[in-house]
Image: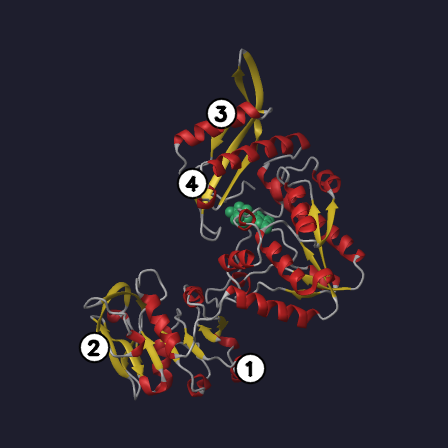
Amino acid sequence: RLLIVDFGSQVTQLIARRLRELNVYCEIHPYQNVTDGFLAEFAPKAVILSGGPCSVFDDGAPMPPPTVFTLGVPVLGICYGQQVMMHCLGGKVERGHKTAEFGRAYVTPKDVTLGLLDGWFEGEREQVWMSHGDHVSEIAPDFEVFGTSPNAPFAITADVSRNFYAVQFHPEVHHTPNGAKLYENFITLAGFTGDWTMGAYREDAIAKIREQVGDKKVICGLSGGVDSSVAAVLIHEAIGDQLTCVFVDHGLLRLGEADEVVAMFRDNYNIRLIHADEQELFLGALDGQSDPETKRKIIGKLFIDVFQKYANEIEGAEFLAQGTLYPDVIESVSFSGGPSVTIKSHHNVGGLPEKMGLKLVEPLRELFKDEVRALGRELGLPKDFIGRHPFPGPGLAIRCPGEITREKLEILRQADAIYIDQIRKHGLYDEIWQAFVAILPVRTVGVMGDYRTYDYACALRAVTSVDGMTADFYPFSHEFLGETATRIINEVKGINRCTYDITSKPPGTIEWE
Ligand code: XMP
């Protein structure tokens, strides 16, 4: 496996993405954790030193241990990583100002016989993305120059005998269009064969789960979302009936959702599943509550109580399974510090394991979201299930601004089902990150037939997004919106007005509360 030492660049995760796309297994670790002991245990087959916002002249500038350069494995330094290499190996770095470079630049080859550059230069020069203040003014002994740009005489350098490569630019970003080629060449030079497939991951993960769990019991909270579902099926494949899933039905699910989840896991997969029907408890506690944070906190607390109650019934459970993903576990290197502001209290069960004295099983910790989907396909989960839009833990509660009533929830379920049906019929589901209806806490006057109506208004929401952090509204055609509004108003008793939410995030959020 390959080690990426993170010096805090905004784009370090993209390096991992590029390598995973080449079927190479890699891990990102913050530079502070990379000690001699760590290196000995990790035993990397190659090392990449990431970019970062610091200067090698800063007090306590982030540095790798010198051992990185005596492991006898290939090393690639990117941007700040390049400066670190030169600084550690006897070259010189100078402070920036005039030579600082941000943005597009063009690199011209000096010698294309370098393995790292194999097939890279298609024309006379290649577009790359630069982002640096300081620059290398003298390369380390044994290094040679293989490419230059107008502002970076040492854009590409290498010590071929030791398989050390250093580039001033960022090959991992989109604006270095052929950058992936450099990574491909680097891993070839390092002897990787690109055999890290989902099939291999599945086998490996199953073996690890068996080893970790032994003959003990595991409980898994199943939400019906992709991550917990894939985790459950994988663990079930590893340990069968030692796994029990708990599915908490808080009465805030979509139309038919509870039945679907139960049918899928209990009936299709034969997984032990407790269907915790706690609708009365949740809806009772939410009665009369209209403040968004209060609603979220009530649901979060009850969820933990309920989960604990059912989990306690499973005798001898020692492990709690969670569908934690890689982006949640990378300890990012933050130089800005400072707490961030809470916009919404997210519903999670983070504190549960300690509270219950359980150990964690997290078989997806090393995967990105799209890799989880690929693993789901590998495990034979139905395609529709794998492609499902995310659904928040607090469910319909945060799509029903103001007080929640059973009547409103029922109306909301009907409208949402029609909206999603429309989106599927028009073949748009997979283009959209998330789509749902929110029922608004206002009634408006309308006319149907010859009668006056006084019913709820609803808002349709659909956004595109890469990670849910930022989002844009989906540009439906007027025909689609017209047809959908007509269907909802005609088919759902209780709604007589339909609006479309055209707010992006920021300044809006995806959910309404
Ligand atoms: P917002 O509304 O903050 O949502 O723009 C971003 C993404 O997170 C989901 N979301 C949640 N997911 N528990 C979850 O598991 C929560 O409490 C929660 N709140 C929002 C939301 O659906 C969107 O995908």
Q: Is residue 196 above or below residue 433?
A: below
Tell me the residue that label 4 is attached to: 474
Mark 2 and mark 4 lie on one chain; the one further toward the N terminus is 2
Helix, strand, or loop for circle 3? Answer: helix
Tell me the residue that label 2 is attached to: 110
Residue type at mark 4: give it: Tyr
Residue type at mark 2: give it: Lys
Tell me the residue that label 1 is attached to: 41
Residue occupying the point 69% across, 44% down:
249
Give the Cα separation between the discs numbered 3 and 2: 65 Å
Residue occupying the point 74% across, 43% down:
278
Mark 4 and mark 1 lie on one chain; the one further toward the N terminus is 1
Mark 3 and mark 4 lie on one chain; the one further toward the N terminus is 4
Residue type at mark 3: give it: Thr
Q: Is residue 65 above or below residue 106?
A: below
Q: Is residue 56 visible?
A: no
Tell me the residue that label 3 is attached to: 486
Mark 1 and mark 3 lie on one chain; the one further toward the N terminus is 1
Could you tell me residue 480's position as x and y percent? 43, 31
Q: Is residue 307 visible?
A: yes
